[in-house]
Structures are given as C-alpha cells and as structure tokens.
Amino acid sequence: MAELRVKDLIVRRNGRMVLDGCSAGFPAGLRTVLWGPSGAGKSTLLAAIAGLVRPNAGTIELGMDVFFSERLRINVAPNARSVGLVFQDLALWPHLRALDQVRLVGKAVGSSRSDALALLESVGILKLADRRPAELSGGEQQRLAIARALAMRPKLLLFDEPLSSVDGTTRRSLRALIRQVSPQVPGPTIYVTYDETDAQELAENVVGLQGGTLQQIQSISEI
Amino acid sequence: MSPTLGIDGLSLAQSVLFALLGAICAVTVGMAAGGMIGLFDFPGRRIATLFLIVPIAAPPAFWWIGFVRVPGVPHLHMAGILPGSIVAGLCFAPVSFLLVLAAIREVPPNTYEAARLFLRPRQRFLHVLTPLLRSALVGGFLLTAILLLGESEIPFLFGFRTVMTDIITGFSRTFSLTSIAPMAATLLILVLIIAGLAVRPIFRTLLAQPRSGAGAVRRPAPPAILLAVAGVLAVTAPLAGYVLPVVRGNSLLSVKLPATLETVAWSIGEPVLCAWITMLAGVIVGYSLRHSRFMPVLLTSGFVVFCIPAAALGIGWIGLARALGNWTAPIVLVHASHLWGLALLGFAAAFARYPASLADAAALVPVSRARGALTFVLPSLAPSLAAISLLVSVLVFSDRDVASLILPPGAERLMLDLYLFSANAPAQALGVLAILTIISAVAAAVLAAAGPWIALRWRG
C-alpha cells in the first residue's frame, strides 16, 4: 500500500502558471476527491501524475517509486508508471472492439483473453465485448473506460470528471461501480469533480485545488 | 495515316512496378515526417513543415538534376526502376505527409494520450496510430501511385520505359491521336480504377467534421526525432546543386539572365491566373451547391479528372481542338480543366470544418445570400482557400507536359527552359536559371495565395 506524494509541483502551460508549488499526500486505499472550480488545474494535476504533462519543477512519488523529479532529472514514461486513468472524454480507441481495448492494455501485464472477459463482466458489459465504442451507450462507454484503466492492474487510479456527460440514473450506477473498483488498486484513487453530489457520494478524503495550490479539506460541507 | 502503336507488356509492367515501389517509398517517408511534425514540438517546426512540402513544388526531375550537380555526387549515374522509384517517391512524399498531418489534426487529443499512457511505443504505433491514420495512408499511397503512373521525366532520366513514356514518344513521333489510343486508354483505365479506390480514403481524411480540439497533443521532441527531421530535410539538398555553382563562380551579377522578361512574366502570370480562376469557380460552385446531393458527385468527378495525367489531358485537348477546326486551346483553360476538382475539394474541405452553428447564425442575418457568404462565412475560410490557390499555382508552374504539348513552337516558360539548359548548358547558367525559376515560383505562389486572402479578409 503506497501513498502518492506531490511536492512543490509547478506546471506552466502557454506561459500561464497552472500549478504553483502544489504539495499534498494522497493516502493509499482511500478515494480522494480533488475538488476545485473550472480551470483550477485539476486535469493538469492528473495529467502530470500520469506523465502526460511534464511539470516544470517539483516531485511526484508513489511510495518508493519516483515518477518525476526535476532535481534528480527523473521523468518516468507514462506507460511505465502503472497509472490507470479514466479520461473526461473517455478517449476510447474508436476502431477497436471493447474486448480488444481491454486485451491490448492487459497484454503489458501478461493478462489473457479470459482475464479481459472477466474484467468486462465485472463492469457489466460482457455481452458487449464485440462492439466498438460508437455502438455503445454513454454509460456503457464509461464502463469500458473503467475496465480499460483496470486492465493494466494499475497501482493508482485516476478519474477526470468522467460522469459529467451522463444522466442521473446512469450516474448513480457508475458511482456504485467506482466505489466497487477503487479498492482493487493498491494505491490511492483520485476523483476529480466539481459536482457536489459526486463528491459527497464518493469522497473518503477531500483535497481542494484553487489558485494553483492544494489544500486539505475536512469535509464537503466545508466547501 | 500513322500505324496504331499497341500496348507494350514490359512498359505496362514497369509502369506498375515504378508506381508501386515509388508509392511505398513516398508513404513511408510521408508517414515518418507527418508523425514527427504532427506529434512533436520543437523550435523551427513550422519552417521544417514548409521545407518538407517544398519537393512537391517542382517535378521530380528538377530535384534529381539538382542532386547530381551537388558537389561530391557529380558522377552519380544511376539507372533502373528501383533508384528511379525511390527518387520519385521521395519527391512525391509531401502528398502523404500532408494527408498524414491532416489526419493527425483530426485525432481527438486524448485518444492518442490514452495510447501513450496505456501502451508501449510499438503497440501504440501498430494498434492505435496506424489504424487512426489508415485513410490518410491508403489515400496517400493511391494518389502517389496515380501521380507516378503519369510521371515521364524520371523514367526517361533513369533509362526505363513506361506506358507514359511510350505515349509521349509515340505522340512526338507521329502527332497522331489514333496511334497512341490503345496505350492512352490502358493508362486511363488503370488511373481511373485507382482514382475510384482513392476517393473514399481521401474524402474521409479531408472532409472531416468540425471539432473543438487541435488534434493529437504535441510533446517536446527528443534528440532522436530532431536528428530524423534533419535527415528528412535533406530531401531539399538538391537545391545546393543549382545554387553552389553560381555562388562559387561569383556569377550571380555577371551572368546574363538566361530568360526574357516576357518568359518570366508568362511563367508567373499563367499559374496565378489559373489559380484564381479555379479558386473562384470552386468557391462559387461549392458554396452554391454545398447542401446539394450533387455535391458528392461533383467532388468525385473533379477528383477523378485531377487524377488523369496532365499530359493525357493535354493530348485530349489537342484532339478536341483539331475536331473543332484550326483552334488551339488556351493553356490556362487546359490547366483549369485539370485542376478545378482540386479547388472544389479544397473549398469542401475548408467548409466541412466550418461550424454549422456559425453558418446558421450567418443565415439569420437579414442580408442577401451572396453578401452573407462574403461577409460572414468565406472570410473564415480565407486561409484554406489561399492554401489551395497556392497549391494550384505551384502545380501549374511546375508543369512541363502540358506546356510542351499546348504552347506554340518558340514559346518559352522557365520550367521548359530549365530542362533544355540541364542537357548542355554550363553549370553556372543552369544555376542562374534555376534560381530565377525558384524566385518566380515563389512569386507566383505568393500572388496566387494573396488573391483570395486579400479579397476575403478585406471583405471580412
């Protein structure tokens, strides 16, 4: 069980300071809701943790593993960090069937076809294994994106506002799924949102991001 | 009456092999260059993009003639289909490069980011990038194959025959259309089949839907990519073969200009006029029929006509002119008849990316349709229309086949003179003419692009 630590993280994009010396710890085994207004830099922080954005300074560590350190000149490639990320727009590969998306990602960790099928079953879309993303509903696509993120047996799981475009009923069932899958990863689960209900339903720990800096928040009601 | 020249099996086989090998080379280089420019960011990326497009601005023979004159490789005498197809493939690589670049700009940003996160580089390339770029790659391959089937100079220079070289030598010898009819028909059928196959992937790449993102996210280029870009940029090295003899001989000011002012004026004026005419026709027809069910038919027809080798179309115009009596088709008309589909496709590609809500908002303004289009819609498309106008002018400027067939004896154009000079003129004179040709080509391209840009931006 490893804690994710972000220390003095600075990210500038197009000349604008997005993260200004962020520091926070994300405890292993807990679902942390990362809360903040639109444009606060929540998605940038997730992208930096995943390795998709290179920070200008600071460190990112998961337990003993250093993902990024400007001082030590370490920047681990995204696919070597073992981070599962559910993108805001899901970013499913349009040309691949559901089963192929999960199998392809699982190959890196030696998963078999039956492992991929079991994963699709666990998120409730086994019957849709032969369909491409365009042939799935919004909720089914969300489930596939979660299955794909889990297929690499990630050490930590990141959700970037994945429920922002689904209706209320689907949203409730997906929240239940997120609660069900997040204990499967050894590290923390970080869930980005600005939706109060999502935050209240999912948060075991809350961190706020405003003005480029992170701050520990006791409860959603404090916000 | 001249005897009919039958189709030669060897020429046909060599045509197909030349097109196939050249297209493979072009797609390989085009994809590598497109991937480097589209997926990575580095200082001078835009200039590198421009340099990678430059080879299409002149026929492959121009580059080869320059290359063999680069100091260090003056005695390079290569012959045969393989080196010929590699040279021609490198020169036509910008076709695939531009299509790959267009396709990368259509990839939703996070789709490729997800591949970076979840997959190893090899898996990413094989299972995500290549399938997402499939239409661009297939379209680039087929379009390059078509261009190579119509290419005649490289086979002449590398000493092998193709159906196209047989048509040109046959027509030059007999001046009879009936004598070359079987060969021309065979080539046309081959081209039309490939053009038919290319329509879907090309249209799928170019006529994409409007979207908010700017394609795959570019990340800082590692040193290996910078080295590879520098390697690909070497494609433009043949320019040194023309420029260095002039610079070394200090003859830029002392050598008499090997072309008259009239030749320069015609060489610049014809491409500009042709670009403006085709662009204007493309915009008027394209905008009027933008929601019509005839538009796809018109686009397909225009694309297929564009695929017909310019020389074959020129010979067709000569036949038509003879049938109509003692008449010569104006060269601008011949080029416009060949390139109108390109202008229409360019307009359609630009309009496909124009948000429908903006077009609807323009339609609600109480002004005439023409004024609404000129004030609200077309100014937003000005950069794309200027780019297409530039492309048309470049294609006309670099033409040699139509000019040599259509122009009256004694008429000169810079590109024609350049070939004549390359045969026996001193290196310095050839260099001066090449520099003059390049400057004129740039002038024609700038003027052609400035037309729609100024007209529409001023309106907007």
Image: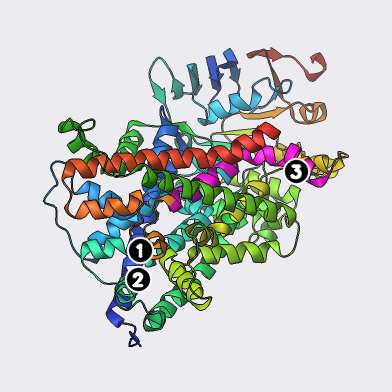
- Height in image: B343 above or below B354? below
Chain letter for the residue marked with disc 2 in the picture: B
Is residue B147 toward the left or the right of residue A89 in the image?
A: left
Q: Which amino acid lies under the numbered mark 2 shown in the image of this protein?
A: Met
Q: Which secondary structure, mark 2? A: helix
Question: Is A84 one of the magenta-colored residues?
Answer: no
Q: Which mark is residue B86?
A: none
Q: Which residues are magenta?
A: B368-396
Disc 1 or 2, which lies upstream in sequence? 1
Which x, y percent locates residue A100?
56, 56
Q: Is circle 3 on the same chain as circle 2?
A: yes
Q: Residues within 10 Å of mark 3 (few under 14, many from 20)?
A: some
Q: Which secondary structure, mark 1? A: loop
Q: Are marks 3 and 2 in contact (CB under 8 Å)?
A: no
Q: Which residue in the rendered view is the most extreme toward the left? A: B75
Q: Which amino acid lies under the numbered mark 3 shown in the image of this protein?
A: Ala
Is residue B100 toward the left or the right of residue B434 in the image?
A: right
Residue topped by disc 1: B151
* Residue at 66% from the left image edge and 53% from the top image edge: A133
Q: Quadrant of residue B379?
A: top right
Which x, y percent locates residue B175?
35, 76
Residue topped by disc 2: B164
Q: State the separation of the CA atoms marked 1 and 2.
A: 7 Å
Residue topped by disc 3: B373
Give B370 or A119, whichever is nearer the viewer: B370
Res. B208 in view: no
Is residue B243 toward the left or the right of residue B23 in the image?
A: left
